[in-house]
Amino acid sequence: MAVYNPKSLKAEEFINDDEIRKTLAYAEENKENTELIDKIIEKARPKKTENGCMCSGLTHREASVLLACEIPEKIKKIYEVAEEIKLAFYGNRIVIFAPLYLSNYCVNGCVYCPYHLKNKNIPRRKLTQEEVIAEVTALQDMGHKRLAIEAGEDPVNNPIEYILDCIRTIYSVHHKNGDIRRVNVNIAATTVENYRKLKEAGIGTYILFQETYHKESYSELHPTGPKHDYDYHTEAMDRAMEGGIDDVGLGVLFGLEMYKYEFAGLIMHAEHLEAVHGVGPHTISVPRVKHADDIDPSAFDNGIDDETFAKIVACIRLAVPYTGMIISTRETEEVRSKLLRLGVSQVSGGSRTSVGGYTEEERPRDTEQFDVSDQRSLDEVVRWLMENGHIPSFCTACYREGRTGDRFMSLCKSGQILNCCHPNALMTLSEYLEDYASEATKKIGYRLVEKELKRIPNETARKIASQNIDDIKNFNRRDFRF
């Protein structure tokens, strides 16, 4: 029987079923232990230091106790601390991105995804490099600077060479004042050699959803194809790190398996990366199973309601305070609004989840990977964020300045967000306002920029940011960054 060891490189040892079950039993036993719950919440609370602000985070057992807790006043406290952590380390910035679907060819049999091999309803499509240029141009015309590319697993139609060609093409497109400055990659688990190739191509974050950490369920949900191999898939982030990619993104698909089990596995995976590589995940995504072509989410009996979903997000924020959190257009405006306060730091906007979707006047439905709940335009999402006190950020400075992995974590922990990330957000927002925003959005935006400039603590940084924004507005200059 495998023994739990967070420093092991074997999936069955760092995501250990016995340890998860013991954790869930411990959480159930202590879910009304108010003394312990208060102690855990207090441990998670951000503490002021001489060099900024620090959070100790929580172990998977501690975080699981909070998730199991059903006492209303304690849940309220958890939410309050989640908000404190979010503001302490990410401020009121919200990073904006869009997915770009390259191909829906796939050899896997994943039962929750319409791209599975047996689905004959959807037309299969793969973008040519000319079509990639057209999609990227359309995204640039919207104002996007950061993409997450997506492709099914198919060694014939979507080999690593095709992905690399697409990345080169994306970075090559310069349209008016538009540039894609960061390409994150969400493709199937691969080899160390291929991860090195992705790193050399200049990718940002490598993202791979675990889908479920429950090994038996994983096998049933992935009955055929290379993704059936649980160990190879679960150990992918270690190979990515070995290949030189130090920004990796985790995620589970909530609704496939018991959420408390998934939550414990997710935090254990983050602990494993920290223990082995010295840096945890750069991001954690929290998608829920949604309807798509031949996929009925009600067929999965582990769905979670919105309140449980909010509690999961808040508890993740307490457990891994320095990790970015992503919520996509799978969720409604109402759900996204609540989760932004509780820990989410990145959102997609104006998304289309179909291959070639951005060049179509109407949103294509026949090749969508999932239904989009938030169908607002990017301009509407940007305006909504600002009206709710958030700064929409198109910043990619840390990646381009080499502040990845533990270097980004050091920046986050040192409390320099307001002197570095905050002005970068305001400058990239100003670019968006000048080049793409509607008049209504532009008016609201510049009021916010003027207000937020005053919050930059360092006088020199504040003056430089202010001057750069003037140059953006009056001299058509672009791409300033701290």
Image (cartoon, rainbow, N blue to C red):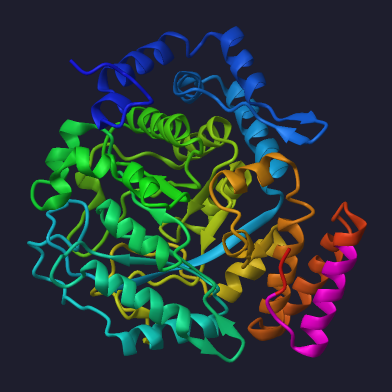
With 241 as the anchor, is 397 left or right in this view? right
Q: Is the magenta stretch mostly helix, strand or loop?
A: helix
Using the image, determine if residue 300 lies above or below residue 99.
above
Using the image, determine if residue 48 lies above or below residue 198.
above
Q: Residue at (61%, 43%) from the top-left corner? A: 409
Q: Which quarter of the picture shows residue 449? A: bottom right
Q: Residue at (32%, 27%) from the top-left corner? A: 8
Q: Does the magenta stretch include residue 477?
A: yes
Using the image, determine if residue 30 lies above or below residue 75.
above
Percent across and percent down for residue 422 are 74, 58
Q: Residue at (66%, 37%) from the top-left corner? A: 85
Using the image, determine if residue 113 lies above or below residue 68.
below
Percent across and percent down for residue 31 are 48, 14
With 227 as the anchor, is 184 left or right in this view? right
Front residue of 172 and 418:
172
Please identify the quadrant where the C terminus is shown.
bottom right
With 435 as the anchor, is 305 left or right in this view? left
Q: How many marks?
A: 0
Percent across and percent down for residue 248 are 43, 49
Q: Which quarter of the picture shows residue 363? A: bottom left
**Bounds of the magenta segment:** 462-479
Please identify the quadrant where the N terminus is shown.
top left
Percent across and percent down for residue 26 are 40, 11
Decide if residue 28 is in sight here.
Answer: yes
Front residue of 77 and 207:
207
